[in-house]
Structure formats: structure tokens, C-alpha cells
Amino acid sequence: MTDFAADLTPAEITRRLDDYIVGQHKAKRAVAVALRNRWRRRQLGPELAADVYPKNILLIGPTGVGKTEIARRLATLARAPFVKVEATKYSETGYHGRDVESMVRDLVDNAIALVRAEKVKEVEARASAAADARVFAALAEARGLADYQGYRAGSSEAADAIWRARPFDAETPDDDGAALAEREQARERLRAELGAGNLERETIEVELRDTRTPTLSVMGPQGNETMGIDAQALQEMWGRAPANRTKIRKLTVAEARTLAHDEEAEKLLDQDAIVTEAVDRAQNDGIVFVDEIDKIVSSGGSDGPDVSREGVQRDLLSVVEGCAVYTRYGHVRTDHILFLCAGAFHFHKPSELIPELQGRFPVRVALQSLTEADFVRILTEPKNALTRQYVALFQTEGVELAFTDDGIRRLAAVAFRANKTTQDIGARRLMTILEKCLEDLSFEASERRGDRITIDQKIVDDRLGESGDDEDLIRYDM
């Protein structure tokens, strides 16, 4: 865990989670302590730290109350590798379906992507400069302002030569001084136009690496899961990798800059260091969120699907207890990965999980169902509140959208009643209600530039019609 985590005290973690999630204080406190314990473990000596295992958490509560959002925001806050999986997608080893260990492989892949993105930011300035040079090289060559015809359009070599070119008389001694000065002025004008962003839509030819490589599908270690293997990676392992292939592509300046930036950043990265750091962060900072764990509880039968369900629990147990999982980057230990499991447990109880798995989730938190007052807060308080999102979306069309207090209370009341009348889907119901309420306005927004639209109680009632109060209609309309 990086040094910034020292400032993430449990109180600070809870406060930051409050910015996005309404209520559920017990769950926030539990995950805050679990995250802080990781930093505390890092302060211990190696021998003692190896024996301090994460306190895995079981989140119990109906859908739509914030279980997934808490886990996802926690991982983002900690800058930790994160993966969300559904327990129902796995089957016992030997059966058809995904192997439980694949969640660890997915976690490592996400860790690689996370670390790579961080390293790209570190070389952002150098990569951007190199990409601009390549784009300028292609533009200069297309306009006859380059004397480096031995290089192909927009390659790194041409970019380095043209961008830092010596005066043209050093390369073309036969040109007269006036022609040299005029050409140099043209190059400076071209560079200025490029820097001002006036050439973004102009089409150029750029040499880029050909990334089209076939993918081979092979069976996983247990024989019941396919793993995508990069064919070029296999060729490199076998010692028969061809030289990097390139191709000339016609792209706009904006598109070429983006692709060239990615290539130049890739050249500046130490791939081995990325893998080493990513594996370490996956093993020590990784967070795995297993949803719908109640769906793999056995109903008490001795055969049929119950056999596989209990088998999935036992396979999951081995991963949660700590084992070495084989990945394309080597073996990864799961001893210190934090596992957050969640389930509604409408038809089963946590005590119906196999005893060994129960013991690996010492922290259990019950999340509360959302009230009508919670819906009002969800619509207004979080940084990413739905009302704020819609206001921003309408602003792109030049339309000013506003919500009154009575309008928000009415939306919350309709959503709460719909959850009570039909299936309770928690805060997700608000998105359904808002989309239905604003559907016509969203369609007309492009033709209403400059208008101000206020969503009050009357508008909500008009847009939702009689279904807002009629329980019989709610079950069909909401």
C-alpha cells in the first residue's frame, strides 16, 4: 500500500465514503477498519506481518442498498486492485463453468492495468512530446517540408530527426538562402498551427505498430476454463518472435496523436517492474468482492445442484484461506487479499454456509433497507447524485434543468412506493423513476436550447401520470 494510505484513518475513510453513499454507517466503519488494518500490518516486522491476516467481511442486505458501491469506492479510495464477481457464475472444480481461482487471475489482470495506468501518468510529458513530434513529422513530410525521405511517415526516427532538424542548409546545400528561410518559416507556422489545435481533423499517414495478433484458446489448469493466450507472447517464449510489425495508417491528427502517445508511453515503461509491482499489490492490497454468495448455499439436498453449490463453497474456502493460484505472471498468494462477500439471504441464513467458510468471515454487517427519507438524500447529497447527473446532461444541450424540494420528495415517494408494491430493488428504482419522468424532456432537449426546466411536484405527477399514486398501476409502469 502506498504512502498516501497513512492519511486514510478510519474516520477519514468513512467521511470519503459518505461523499457517495448515504447511510449504512456500520458497513462503512467495518470496511474502514479492514482497510486501515492493511496499513497497520505494513508497519509490522516481516515475521509478524506474515501472520496478520485480513478480517474478511460478510455484507448482508437486500439489493440496491449500497453493498457493491461500498466495495468499489473502498478500492478506488485505496488505489487497490479490485474485482467484482458473482458467486453464481462459478462451479465446483471438474464441473462445467468458471473455476473459482479465476477471480484471482482477474484480480491480477486488473492490478496490471492499474499499475500500468499509474506509470503512464509518470511518463505523460515525455510520451506527449514524442507523440507530437511524430505527428509533426507526418505533417511536415506530407507538405514537402522534410528532407528525410529515407524514413517512413510518422515513424519515431523521422519524428526525432524532423522535430530537431538542423538548419536546412546543412542537409540541402544546393538550396539558396531565401528558399531555406521560407521553408523554415513554413515549418514554424506548421508547428504553431499544430500546437494551437487547428489541424486536429486533418488526415495524415502515420507508421504505427500492428497490434493485430491472434489469440489462442487453451484449457485452464483444471480443464474447465479457457484462458486467452497472446500468440506473440507464446512466440517470444519459444524464441521465434518476429520483429515488431508496423503498418502505415491514415488517421486524423487527433487519432494519430492518441495512438502514437500510447506507443511512446509503452516504450518508456519497464514491463518487468510493472508486473512485479502489480503482483505485489494484488497479493497484499487486492480486494475481491463476491456478490450473491447466498445463492451458493445448499438447500439440504444430497444430490443435484446442491452438490455443486457446496463444492463452490469449498473451492472458495481454499482461496480465502490462502493458497497459491497460477496466473500468466506466475503464482500469486491469496493469504492477504481482502474478501468482501455479500448476499441478500432472503431464503437462507449465513449460518447455512459451510462452517469453515463462515469462520473465514469474522466480520458480519447487516445493511438496512432504504427509507423514503434515504431516497431524498440519495437524490441530493452524493457527489454523483442522479439529479446532478441529469442537470449536467441537459447543460450539454444548453438547457437549464432544476429540481425543487417538493419535486425531489415526490420522486422519492413514488420510488419508495414502487419498491414496496413490486420487487424491492433499492436505490436502483430511482434511476427508473427519473428516466421515466424525464424521458420526453430528454427527447426534446436538443430543440429547447436556452430554456429553463423546473422539475417540481406538479411536473412529476404529470409525467408519471396516475401510476404515481395507483399501486395497481405501479406494478406495471415502474
Image: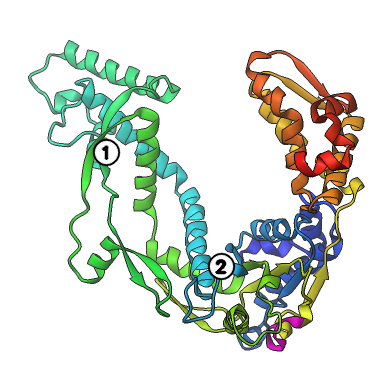
Tell me the magenta residue range.
352-357
- The stretch drawn in magenta includes residue 354: yes
| Residue 199 location, quadrant | top left
Q: Main secondary structure of the magenta part?
A: helix
Q: Which residue is mark 2?
A: 89
Which quadrant does the N terminus fall into?
A: bottom right
Q: Which residue is mark 1?
A: 160
What residue is drawn where x is 73% and y is 59%? 70
Q: Are marks 1 and 2 in contact (CB under 8 Å)?
A: no
Q: Give percent across and percent down for residue 328.
A: 39, 71
| Residue 352 location, quadrant | bottom right
Please report whichever mark, 1 or 2, sits nearer to the chain's N-terminal start: 2
Mark 1 element type? helix
Considering only vertical position in the picture, is 83 above or below 451? Answer: below
What residue is drawn where x is 28% and y is 16%? 186
| Mark 1 to mark 2 CA distance (whole Å) | 51 Å
The residue lying toward the viewer, choosing from 298 and 171, is 298
Left or right of 215: which side holds 472? right
Q: Which amino acid, mark 2? A: Lys
What residue is drawn where x is 76% and y is 68%? 59
Q: Give percent across and percent down for residue 163.
A: 29, 32
Considering only vertical position in the picture, is 443 above or below 324? Answer: above
The residue lying toward the viewer, choosing from 103 and 253, is 103
What residue is drawn where x is 28% and y is 25%? 139
Q: Which amino acid, mark 1? A: Asp
Which quadrant does the C terminus fall into?
A: top right
Q: Give percent across and percent down for residue 255.
A: 38, 33
Left or right of 18: which side holds 243? left
Mark 2 element type? helix
